[in-house]
Image (spheres, rainbow, N blue to C red):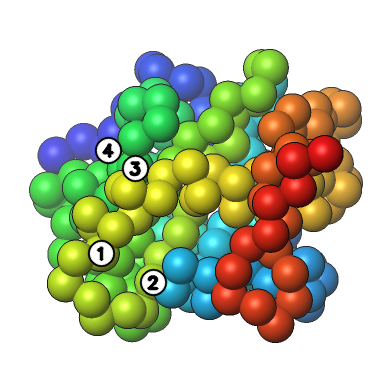
């Protein structure tokens, strides 16, 4: 089976330094996103940015999740890298995004190897940019898919917060001025050492 022909749909390409970028800022990313870990049982968060040049830049709290797929050129067989595969406002579960020929290889590298019980992505479009917020959990709750579908709004809020925190890092790797996420300031903000969100409606 041929890989997903992403170039036909979005003309996507990885940033030429993507494998370095994934580990360059690991400590800073952990510091900035550590408040999000544990919220809604989440153990992994990454944000994939597709800029107006259709170039992919990824910052991840668990960079090995994306590194393995990119280094082995398997990302082409994973629909969750392609904004064209998403429906607005809907969760795309990782195990529904793998092509059949590479299903078990992708599932092992992305989920089993990291002890994740479930992974999923949501898509936000801002101006000419796409943001894919990626999450995973190690929870063994049997109702996880229904649970995360029911809190989709909160997941967008967490992703928006993460993008706001990491925006300066993304701008180091593009000559394009990145837009602010228009909804960040009126959404929730995580509070350190609390597994809840505080809403600021001001």
Q: Which mark is residue 3?
A: 4
Earlier sequence position, callout 2 versus callout 4:
4
Q: Residues within 10 Å of mark 2 (few under 14, many from 20)?
A: many
The quadrant in which the N terminus is found is: top left
Task: Give the labeled residue for mark 1.
Answer: 144
Residue 104's x, y, as percent? 16, 64
Residue 200's x, y, as percent? 76, 48
Which image quarter: residue 160? top right
Mark 2 and 4 residues: CB-CB less than 8 Å, in contact? no
Task: Give the labeled residue for mark 2.
Answer: 137
Disc 1 element: helix
The answer to whether residue 18 is above or below residue 27 is above
Earlier sequence position, callout 1 versus callout 2:
2
Earlier sequence position, callout 3 versus callout 4:
4
Q: Residues within 10 Å of mark 3 (few under 14, many from 20)?
A: many
Q: Is residue 57 left or right of residue 81?
A: right
Which image quarter: residue 5? top left
Earlier sequence position, callout 3 versus callout 2:
3
The answer to whether residue 28 is above or below residue 150 is below
Task: Give the labeled residue for mark 3.
Answer: 91
Give the Cα distance between marks 1 and 3.
12 Å
Give the Cα distance between marks 4 and 1.
29 Å
Give the Cα distance between marks 3 and 2.
14 Å
One can see residue 44 in this view = yes
């Amino acid at each position: 089976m041929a890989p997903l022909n992403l170039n036909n749909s979005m003309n996507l390409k990885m940033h030429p330094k993507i494998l370095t970028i994934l580990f360059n800022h690991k400590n800073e990313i952990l510091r900035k996103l550590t408040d999000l870990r544990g919220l809604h049982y989440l153990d992994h968060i990454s944000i994939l940015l597709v800029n107006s040049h259709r170039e992919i830049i990824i910052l991840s709290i668990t960079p090995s999740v994306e590194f393995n797929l990119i280094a082995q050129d398997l990302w082409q067989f994973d629909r969750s890298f392609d904004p064209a595969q998403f429906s607005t406002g809907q969760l795309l579960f990782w195990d529904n995004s793998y092509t059949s020929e590479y299903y078990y290889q992708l599932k092992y590298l992305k989920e089993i190897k990291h002890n994740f019980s479930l992974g999923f992505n949501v898509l936000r479009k801002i101006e000419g940019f796409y943001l894919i917020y990626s999450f995973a959990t190690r929870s063994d709750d049997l109702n996880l898919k229904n649970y995360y579908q029911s809190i989709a709004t909160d997941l967008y809020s967490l992703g928006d917060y993460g993008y706001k925190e990491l925006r300066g890092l993304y701008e180091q790797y593009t000559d394009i001025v990145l837009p602010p996420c228009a909804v960040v300031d009126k959404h929730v903000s995580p509070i350190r050492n609390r597994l809840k969100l505080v809403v600021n409606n001001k």
